[in-house]
Image (cartoon, coloured by chain):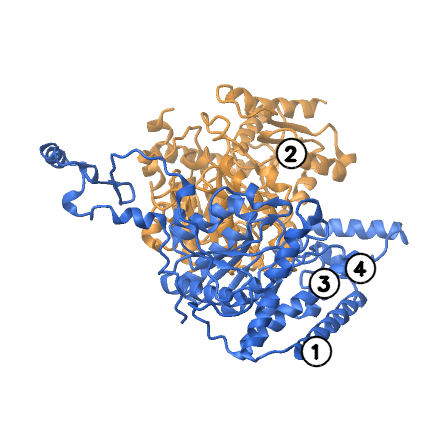
Amino acid sequence: MSPSVARCPRSLAAGSAGLRNVVLSATSASSTGSRIRSASDSLLLRPPRSNREPRRQRWTAASKGGALARPRALHPPGFPNRRASSVVDNDIDEDDDSVAAGAHGTKGASAAAGPGSGCGTRYAEGPSTRMNLFTAVNAGLRTAMETDDTAIVFGEDVAFGGVFRCTGGLKEQFGPDRVFDSTLCEQGIAGFAIGYASMGKTAIAEIQFADYIFPAFDQIVNEAAKFRYRSGDQFNCGGLTIRAPCGAVGHGGHYHSQSPESYFAHTPGLKVVMPRNATEAKGLLLASVREPDPVIFFEPKILYRTSVEDVPDGDYEVPLGVADVMREGTDVTLVGWGAQLRVMSEACDDAEKEGISCELIDLRTILPWDFDTVSRSVKKTGRLVVSHEAPRTGGFAAEVAADMQERCFLHLEAPVQRVCGYDTPFPLVFEKFYVPGRFKVLDAVRDAVNY
Amino acid sequence: MLSLPLSTRCVRPWAAATQKLPKVTKSTTSHMSSAGSETTRAAAATRDAPAKVGVYAGGKEMPFTSILRIEDPDKLPVWPVFRVLDDDGSVRADAVEPKLGKETALKMYGNMVRLEAMDDIFYNAQRQGRISFYLQSAGEEALQMGGAAALDMNDMAFTQYREPGLLMWRDFGVQSFADQCLSNISDLGKGRQMPVHYGSKELHYQTVSSPLGTQIPQAVGAGYALKLSGKDNIAVCYFGDGAASEGDFHAALALAATRDVPVLFVCRNNGYAISTSVADQYRGDGIVSRAPGYGMHAVRVDGNDALAMFAATAEARRVCLSQKKPVLMEAMTYRLGHHSTSDDWSRYRSSNEVKQWKANHHPIRRFYSYLEGKGWWDSAKDRVLRDRERRSVLIALETAERKAKPSLGSMFEDVYEVVPPHLQEQKHQLYAHLERNAGRYDGAGG
């Protein structure tokens, strides 16, 4: 790892300028169907409004206080006011402040792109700041606490800023009653948070690693998830959000690498969310905190420092339960979430070079997931590849695959491909062989197309 | 407020030990309290004056000793059981009799009798197959009603399943209990939980869940919310001696102590977790003895003494609110009935043991004797009361049986605040299935 290069804001800035050009040319070429885009470009290049509006309305219309109804939510596509973002292949260390500078780098001007620069998601009006994902989480937490006096942030080691620096400065701003260290006890953190939320208040609890969430499994699965249902809607803990860093990081071994989203996705009553980049992280986190249902918010820790973007300073939400078509294509649909999208995006680039047109979808919310968007895509492409880091058997890819064969059976040209971690514990020294990397995804894409 | 001998109790083993310790002053503090080289030199210069205390992380001063001794817990004094009434219902000579007032005392007694009547009839209704399951409170009526009377109606209650008395005290009618046990359309829980899983937002009584101990850390979170909002209310949390072995108990007490949360933990130590005796549940002096380890106030009470429960709960609540701190109460009692209707106590305890408790320590009889001694109650009034309560429970049960079940569509509601698309879809799939299989399912209306 070379922090000086990988984390250098200058290199990112230079990269983004280059990407901007790519984006603009890609936009102009979109009608021809030939596109070369990076994962992050999707922030700028979204499907035309007419394609996306019905889906969003379908979901939010059913949601009381849904994203569109919320005054702070600004989701309609418009002209991008942001520079292109970038993800740099990187590695991270816990509690390493040396790179924080990269997080607080350049304060962007409003960066409003002029008319004609293409469609894109407008996350929020106003200026943006270049920051990494942990800083975006920090900004989201700050916004959540500023706009809700009842919001508390707590967990192990959060008061000094957290081992991943997500809670830095919050105690200083909001005081020790609202930002504090819990005892070292995950079931206590979860139980306390549920009880606090049951009083109609907002609890944002941190589990230091998703690998250590299991002592809290009973509280989350048997209590939080069933709180509203079992009381006949008399009580609820909708103000509960549990944040937990997840996923591979290069050297985490069994207990600092797991992605346990499918355990929670099997639990009615929970919402399970995983962002793919810094901008999405802030918007999805704010939506999760304000969601009237308990949310498990997994943060891919590989992205904490490697996803660096111009994140809007404003208060904005990315709606839950709505997938994002990051990249349009015609030959094969790829579905993923979190950090895996970076890998899949690279595989899409490789596939495009071979003449395979890929459609890449970020599920964003794993429960409840947006099967409409995925099935619309699969009906178009006839092929589906689903990928996640978690082990294959019983992973959420199995659910996506089963559901899609039910919905799209006659449209499928090939068996649904799953590219996942193997059914072994996460193996420290064999990580690069274990993870569903770029070339495994590419193989699956080829297999689907050549079936 | 009542003045109780909580603070005058002199059995704390560590109290005796600390009396022998030197008074800690700056000058006796050892070099461990500072890392400065100057201090180290000073320590070296005074080597012949051994350090008396060390200061460890968190600022805690601890005396040094040269005597190696492994402490034997059996040598520690046993926590006493606070009681006001003796078994015959007379006020103990040295006890401070809480000033209950006739009205409160009779309301407590009336509710104890009502709870006993409800238990008896619902238990038999289960045996007749009229309800699916039931759990009695038999033997623990005073524990529940004495404590309930001392709490504020707005104190948020987190309970297990053997504390319906608190809800009854807050005027949850027998009809509401029956509706829940029958899972009918009037059940506030919409027919989603087994009998005895009551809950009422209006009465600040969080809905009971089956997993044991989960409510304990939740009560801490709720108490913290009350504290931050500046309310003069506490969270109160009930659980059994078995649940105190769950990790959640430890999680909760540690958090409550470190966050200074106004929450009252009440452990109903009734001797058994289903069949497991406390002899196999813990080796120490019950549950209360754990409190000092958490740095928590604590009291042990005779749970079959309604007056003691009232007085101790009132005082514990005062400590919670005035000091913004948690209190652990261990209420000693005995489960006279089965664990539940799925249990048979004769398989693991002697009938003599049960008979002895029923004959000598029955909480309702003890409180009756007290009321009779005060001239507030007599056997004629008692007969009328008991007949009336039994009749009203029977009517409530029959009424509940006649009510409709909740609508089938409600099965898919309240999983989330808004029914998401996949649940709407599954609901339609169920309806479609029912249409294709008309007549194969009972009660598919709605």
How busy is the neighbourhood of tag 1: few (under 14 within 10 Å), some, or many (20 plus)? Answer: few
Residue position marked by numbered label 3 in the rendering: B120
Question: Which color is chain B depicted in?
Answer: blue
State which tag comes first along the sequence, 3 or 4.
3
The residue identified by callout 1 is B384
Mark 2: give few (<14), some (14-19) or many (20+) Cα within 10 Å: many
Q: What amino acid type should be assigned to the residue bearing mark 2?
A: Ala
In the image, residue B13 lies at what x, y percent?
Answer: 36, 48
Few, some or many residues within 10 Å of mark 3 (<14, 14–19, 20+): some
Q: Nearer the viewer, residue A335 or B365?
A: B365
Q: Which chain is orange?
A: A
Chain under disc 4: B
Amino acid at pointer 4: Arg
Element assignment for label 2: helix
Q: Which of the numbered marks, if any, corresponds to residue A439?
A: none
Along the line of sight, which residue is nearer the eye, B365 or B402?
B365
| Relative image position of residue B213 (x, y in whole percent) | 55, 49
What amino acid does circle 1 point to?
A: Val
Callouts 3 and 4 close, C-beta under 8 Å: no
Percent of width and height locating residue B109: 60, 72
Let me know if marks 2 and 1 both belong to one chain: no
Secondary structure state at the residue bearing disc 1: helix
Q: Tag 1, which chain?
A: B
Give above or below for B10 relative to A298.
below
